[in-house]
Amino acid sequence: MIDQILERENYVLAKKMLDVSQARHEAISGNLANAETPGYKRVDIKANFPDELKKLAESNDVESISKLQTRLETDLNSPIVRPDGNNVQLDSELLKMSENAMQYEFLTQYTANSMKRIKTAITGRVQ
Amino acid sequence: MNIMPGLESTASALAAEKVRLDVIGQNIANAHTTKGPDGKPYSRQLVSFETKLMEIGTNSDGSKKMGTGVSVKSITSDPKSGPLVYNPGHPDADEKGMVRLPNVNLTHEMVDMIAASRSYEANLEVVRTAKQMAQNALRIGR
């Protein structure tokens, strides 16, 4: 029975988003590591990923949400900032990183709070 | 599963930036070295980086997860020759009293040094953020 609670779509979505957030941090760390590598192109989560996830979330398809793979893709559209073809912009990359960390914090707190609510329901006491 | 995401590539970048700073330090130290072991004036060393594909963990389906790190590709000498100055009292002066100085430009080196240390800081910020993310994740159950 508890499984049903923990497999509700809000949990599955939060888990998926935490995965995405972690993958994005990995991508950004790779970008910052290569900020001065000649010819390097930045990588990020696939541009259409948010739409895909949104569509699945709207259809309440828990199975497909948990199966959805987070793929990274090379970003060729960002403007080139170095004559060698590198397109990593230090400031925008750091901004994306803080934004992503904030999103991660939101998701962890969201998950923690909804777990707390379940605990309250089980014990009948506010923790 | 990796509790602190992105650390492998960041660690490689920190190491590479350190090499770059080392080489800049060497260039500045030798800015006035008119005779090296080969008998020629010191020539400026340049570090170049390349992307390194590295394993950063495993995916949920068991396959290897790859990330992009960075490594030092080569350290090459700048072939340009340095300025020639008239200083007949110098022990390395030629018969006309001219001394060939190293091709190290202190201004370039300082600018490079600032760039390298900024890159180093940016990578440290990645580690700090990863730590914060891990701490948040560990607080979920509380």
Image: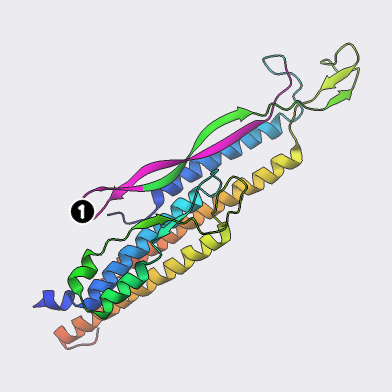
Q: Residue at x 37, y 67 (%)?
A: A48
Q: Which element type, helix, strand or loop, lies under badge 1?
A: loop
Task: Residue A8: give x, y in percent of width and height.
Answer: 19, 77
User: Residue lying furthest top in this view?
Assistant: B95
Find out whether residue B58 is within the magenta segment.
yes
Badge count: 1
Q: Amino acid at mark 1?
A: Asp
Image coloring type:
rainbow
Residue A24 quadrant:
bottom left
Q: Nearer the viewer, residue A85 or A110?
A: A85
Task: Residue A108: give x, y in percent of width and height.
Answer: 33, 72
Residue B127 can be seen, yes or no: no
Q: Nearer the viewer, residue A48 or A100?
A: A48
The chain identifier of the residue carrying mark 1 reads B
Q: Residues within 10 Å of mark 1 (few under 14, many from 20)?
A: few
Find out whether residue B9 is within the magenta segment.
no
Q: Residue at x 49, y 41 (%)?
A: B15
> Is A56 located above or below residue B121 in the figure?
below
Task: Residue A10: give x, y in percent of width and height.
Answer: 25, 78
Classify residue B100 as left or right of residue A57.
Answer: right
Residue B5 quadrant:
bottom left
Magenta span main SS: strand
Task: Residue B136: give x, y in percent of width and height.
Answer: 36, 67
> Is A97 located above or below residue B46 in the figure?
below
> Is A116 located above or below residue A37 in the figure?
below
Residue B98 quadrant:
top right
**Magenta span of residues:** B40-66
> Is A108 located above or below residue B58 in the figure?
below
Q: Residue at x 70, y 18 (%)?
A: B36
The residue singled out by tag 1 in the image is B61
